[in-house]
Image (cartoon, grey):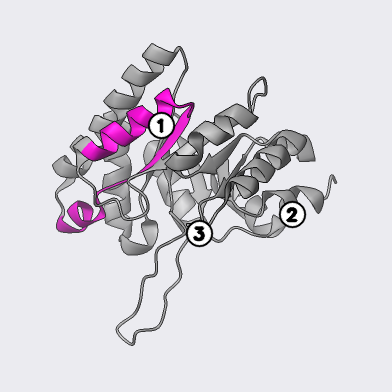
Amino acid sequence: MNKKEIAKYIDHTLLAPQATINQIVRLCQEAIRYDFASVCVNPSFVKVAASELVDTDVKVCTVIGFPLGANTSQVKAFEARQAILEGASEVDMVINIGAAKDGRYSAVGSDISEVVKASRKAGEETGRDIIIKVILETCFLTDEEIENCCLCAKKAGADFVKTSTGFANPKGIDGQLLPNGASVHHIKLMRKVVGSDMGVKASGGIRSISMVKDLIEAGANRIGTSSGTHIIEVWDED
């Protein structure tokens, strides 16, 4: 896989709360230079990113209900619609994680469905095909819960399932931080559940070439990372 091919896997990401307009502009310039799939920014920067990426094939991706997923479905749907009207072509929504932990999968599914419906409608109004990715926050879920959430996303008509926000801080009973972010195990599991009809996005803690290769081999067809430029610059063409 060459650099041009791998670049189209990458959502070039900057979601830090302290991000500035200048940093978002630079993110967009880097995305244009390397021809990434998208830039992923917070909703308040969608207009900026859309302006910078006019007449390029780099998409504007934003996050919905981020990072906790605890907003009401109506708020998530409104947020998605607004972002699309302002220029986003991809929305990455966080599920209702508490509902998943409760086993309330009908609530998980309806939450996703509300965002999917609002996004599709806004896409029709703007004349753009919208991609909806569903963030599971896998570090908080068991394998069974991940499987059920993937099925919810598939039934709701989403386009991708995604591992993580990158902002979760799971802790053990001793108070020590546990692993979060993407893992080969979770990507394989998610790919197995959704089959070939949906995308699988790996995100959270992806900073090395070896990890990207392992995640793609496991079934990921989109990579969310803030280290995209480093990954491409050191990618071995052989």
Q: Which residues are magenta?
A: 75-102
Q: Residue at x 40, y 83 (%)?
A: 176
Query: Which badge, 1 or 3, comes first in the chain's sequence?
Result: 1
From the image, tell me which residue sits under label 1.
83
Q: Quadrant of residue 58?
A: top right
**Residue 222 location, x and y as percent?**
56, 40
Looking at the image, is mark 3 or mark 2 earlier in the sequence?
3
Q: Is 73 left, or right, of 36 in this rendering?
A: left
Amino acid type at mark 1: Ala
Is residue 14 found left or right of 174 in the rendered image?
right
- Residue farthest along the right direction in this orientation: 238
Residue 38 shown left or right of residue 200 in the figure: right
Question: Residue 159, can we see it?
Answer: no
Amino acid type, label 2: His
Q: Which residue corresponds to the image point at 84% horizontal and 44% vertical from the top-left?
A: 237
* Residue highlighted by disc 3: 183
Residue 230's mark? Answer: 2
Mark 2 or 1, which is nearer the eye? 1
Where 222 sits versus 129, above or below?
Answer: below
Q: Which is in the foreground here, disc 1 or disc 3? A: 1
Mark 3 surroundings within 10 Å by alpha-carbon count, few (fewer than 14), some (14 through 19), many (20 or more): many
Task: Label 3, secondary structure: give it.
Answer: loop
Q: Is residue 161 above or below residue 173?
A: above
Residues under labels 1 and 3: Cα distance? Answer: 29 Å
